[in-house]
Image (cartoon, helix red, strand yellow):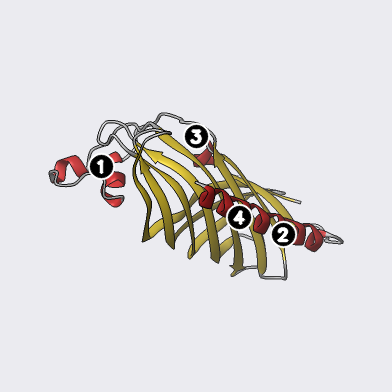
Amino acid sequence: MKFYQNVQQMIRRIALLLVLAFVGATEGLHAQRFAVSANLPALLTGTISVEPSVALGDRTSLQLSFSARPGLFKLPMPVGLINTLYGHLGNVGFSERLKWGSVEHAEMAAFSPALRYWTKGVYNRGFFVSGHALGMVYRFGGGSLSRTYSEGFLVGAGGSIGYSYELAPHWNLEAEVGLAGVWTRYDERYSAKQVRTADKSRVMVLPSRIGLSLAYVF
């Protein structure tokens, strides 16, 4: 786990450098050049989400997305599909792979900087496209379909498309969907003290941006 701790420290340092650069970029900005948003569906799953954003030009902006789920918030999840993705199920029927249920672990912390291009101007009503990086540490799995859970980290990058709608002066509603290619390294565990398989790794394509965010534009 020392390796995972080193990765977490590296992610924190990169995030800190980007935050400092973000703060420096906001100095001297005028109105409609800075925004803060929160992903509403994420909040409903117990995920703390905050997304500051700064305009870099008339059509480009930099967004820093921070999210964390410190504990389990029990909601039905597609556990069959998730365990299939991680290879936990082995030889089971198709119906089991479509099964929904709860999991024992769903903790995570993630940081995702994104560069957005706005077709109608920054924070205006219209479409935007985004390129983003992603870093995450996580503990996920266990429950009705699998005795084991995964604990590790992932890094990757991807793209997304979204639409911003002006609700009122200073208030926008943003919808966004996107995918990312990620590399993950993790331990497969029975418990905190019992490891089934250590240092597994794989490359995957995952949904990295699924959100409906309420944004306040300064």
Q: Is residue 177 left or right of residue 214?
A: left
Report the residue marked by disc 1.
80
**Label ID, residue 17:** 2
Report the residue marked by disc 4.
11
| Nearest-to-viewer mark from 1 and 2 | 2
- 27 or 185: nearer the viewer: 185
Disc 3 to disc 2, C-alpha distance: 30 Å
Disc 4 to disc 3, C-alpha distance: 26 Å
> Residue at point 76% right, 58% down?
20
The three-letter code of the residue at mark 3 reads Leu
Report the residue marked by disc 3.
44
Q: Is mark 4 in CB contact (under 8 Å) with mark 3?
A: no
The three-letter code of the residue at mark 4 reads Ile
| Nearest-to-viewer mark from 3 and 1 | 1
Q: Residues within 10 Å of mark 1 (few under 14, many from 20)?
A: many
| Nearest-to-viewer mark from 3 and 2 | 2
Q: Is residue 32 left or right of residue 210?
A: right
Return the x and y of residue 106 as percentages of the image width and height.
44, 37
Secondary structure under the numbered disc 4 in the rendered image = helix
In which image quadrant can residue 193 be found? top left
